[in-house]
Image (cartoon, grey):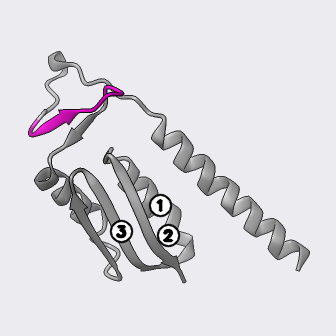
């Protein structure tokens, strides 16, 4: 029981740290690098946010290996729901956060 509690605590710590680090990234795009700025909006912290259409395509690509997960995009916010194996949970959340949505509404349940 003690080992299970320690593992749970460490897993929660890793997830919290991963989400915190990924949300603190501030990648300013330089127009001289040739990076595409298709349908993006810059929010107050200087991060480019893709349009809902572009973000939807990226979210679909990120979740293609998770058939049990449903994702929607509304006003730059991604909502993910469904069941995901606990070993793949963090990887999926990281992939969604790396798309830089305004917000992630996480309704996932770990199996």
Quadrant placement of the N terminus: bottom right
Q: Is residue 57 left or right of residue 1?
A: left
Quadrant placement of the C terminus: bottom right
Residue at which label 2 appears: 88
| Mark positioned earlier in the residue sequence (3 or 2) | 3
View extreme (right): residue: 2
- Where residue 9 sits, quadrant-wise, is bottom right
* Residue 73 drawn at (x, y percent): 23, 61
Question: What's the residue at 47%, 60% (across, down)?
Answer: 91
Above or below for 90 versus 31: below
Question: What's the residue at 14%, 51% (across, down)?
Answer: 54
- Where residue 28 sits, quadrant-wise, is top left
In magenta segment, residue 61: no
Residue at which label 1 appears: 91
Labels 3, 2: front one:
3
* Residue 93 drawn at (x, y percent): 44, 59
Q: CA distance from mark 3 to mark 1?
A: 13 Å
* Residue 101 drawn at (x, y percent): 31, 48
Above or below for 62 versus 70: above
* Cβ–Cβ under 8 Å for marks 3 and 2: no
**Which contiguous range is marked in magenta?**
38-46
Question: What's the residue at 13%, 25% (across, down)?
Answer: 34
Closer to us: 16 or 45 = 45
Residue 80 tag number: 3
> How would you classify the magenta stretch by its main secondary structure?
loop
Q: Secondary structure at mark 1?
A: helix
Q: Is residue 70 left or right of residue 10?
A: left
Is the residue marked by circle 1 packed among few (<14), some (14-19), or many (20+) residues within 10 Å? few
* Residue 63 drawn at (x, y percent): 30, 68
């Amino acid at each position: 029981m003690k080992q299970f509690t320690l593992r749970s605590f460490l897993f929660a710590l890793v997830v919290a740290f991963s989400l915190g680090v990924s949300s603190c990234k501030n990648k300013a795009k330089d127009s001289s690098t040739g990076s595409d700025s298709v349908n993006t909006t810059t929010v107050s912290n200087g991060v480019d946010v893709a349009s809902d259409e572009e973000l939807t395509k990226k979210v679909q690509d990120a979740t293609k290996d998770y058939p049990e997960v449903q994702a929607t995009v509304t006003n730059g916010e991604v909502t993910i729901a469904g069941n995901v194996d606990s070993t793949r949970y963090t990887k999926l959340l990281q992939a969604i956060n790396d798309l830089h949505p305004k917000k992630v509404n996480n309704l996932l349940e770990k199996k």
